[in-house]
Amino acid sequence: MNRILLIEDSPTVRRLLISTLQRELDFTVDAAATLDEAMRVLSHPSVHYLAALVDLTLPDAMHGEAVPAVMAHDVPVIVLTASVSETKREQLIAQGVVDYIIKDSKGSLQYAVALLKQLYRHRSTSLLVVDDSVTSRNQTSALLQRWQFSVYEATDGYQAIHILAKHPDIRLVLTDFHMPGMTGLDLLKQLRERFDRQSLAVIGISAQNNRTLPALFIKHGANDFLHKPFAPEELLWRVSLTLEHLELFQEIRELAHRDPLTRLYNRRFLFEQGNRQYLANRLQRQHAVMVLDIDHFKRINDTWGHQIGDQMLCHFAALLRLAFPDDLIARLGGEEFCVLLWHCSPAQAIAKAQQFLAQLKTKPLTHSVAGDLFITTSAGVETMLHNSLDEALQAADRLLYQAKADGRDCVRYTQDMAPG
């Protein structure tokens, strides 16, 4: 869906928009100068568009006829216009357009780029609208769906909690304040018991002329607040900005939790998130802790240099991802790695470790200068119960050193958990 339809009769504006959209978004842009040309383009059933930028005044559609014609093909429309009155704005919104762009400055192009970026992201984003008023709920949901969001609806706070439990992919909740049984503020308090502001965004909404209500919502963990009636444009940008803040926080958190070279989780994440998972799963006896160390890694660096050494670490990390796709993998430091294996018996964990060592012998790092470089690794697999992940890692580390002492390129494990 990274394809845009541009309908604009001015060659200058058309060229400028095409170059800007292709440069800034790397989207494919199909252009037409008239409504007739656009209809021919839209007649191809195999071509699908994220949106269409439609000039309001075309040679064969002087009075905005292109807008409903394009929308009839289920293509979201963004209107291009030289100016817009309040009456025309209301008419466009009533028609169901995504938005309108006034072609009067460089800022308009930047707005168009930002809007299309949002539409592209919105297609994979789920929201929840909570409102006991059918009319109000439908209006808000219709606007959000117009902007390509996937929207769930709830009539009260209790139903909202039930829907969130069934659909954990929901990123943002818009809740009215005044609802029977559970107010929007009560719902917010319950949600903040389960989700922080960076995991689930909440925007409060109210028609009440209460000056303290926005402050109450914000103080109890809301990300934003809107007064009814609100302009559709305001709703769009409040929602979009809130989601952008969530994305930025996730990016920052990812940077803090990832090893910059291999992109595996780092030691910090392992001890924070991994320890919680370990404690939650340890009594089920369906997990294991494995520590691996690349054999003779210093020799690789001394022989071929640190650049190839870094490539070897990335190659090893990629093979770990392939072998353990459902497990938590982390780089402990240097050439040492850790895998927390979930949902497998001790015997299965040991067998997986042995299979990984065998796979290394068939998957070398191929380099233009060094040729095929094969590596081996030593591994320690701890399957016994411990009070913490730290204790389990220490035990796995002792098994790793035993593997090193036994000649490397082997797996050592808790003896009473031997396979078969």
Image: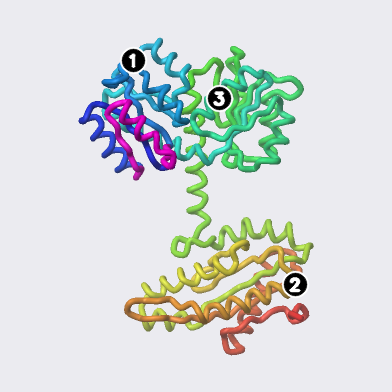
- Residue 194 in the figure: left or right of residue 330: right
Amino acid type of the residue that numbered disc 3 sits on in the rendered structure: Ala
Q: Quadrant of residue 309?
A: bottom left
Residue appearing at x 56%, y 16% in the figure: 228
The residue tagged 1 is: 63
**Residue 249: where, in percent of width, then height?**
51, 44
Separation of marks 1 and 2 at Cα, in angstroms:
76 Å
* Residue 195 visible from this viewpoint: yes
The secondary structure type at the circle numbered 1 is: loop
The residue segment tinted magenta is: 26-49
**Residue 91: where, in percent of width, then height?**
43, 14
If the image is split into quadrants, where does the N terminus sit?
Answer: top left
In magenta stretch: residue 240:
no
- Residue 3 in the figure: left or right of residue 266: left
> In terms of sequence position, does the residue under pointer 1 or pointer 2 come before the other?
1
Q: Quadrant of residue 367?
A: bottom left
Which sits in the foreground, 45 or 185? 45
Amino acid type of the residue that numbered disc 2 sits on in the rendered structure: Met
Separation of marks 2 and 3 at Cα, in angstroms:
55 Å
Separation of marks 3 and 1 at Cα, in angstroms:
25 Å
The residue tagged 2 is: 384
Q: Quadrant of residue 344?
A: bottom right
Residue appearing at x 65%, y 42% in the figure: 168
* Residue 221 visible from this viewpoint: no
Amino acid type of the residue that numbered disc 1 sits on in the rendered structure: His
> In terms of sequence position, does the residue under pointer 2 or pointer 3 come before the other?
3
In the picture, the disc for residue 142 is: 3
Q: Residues within 10 Å of mark 2 (few under 14, many from 20)?
A: some
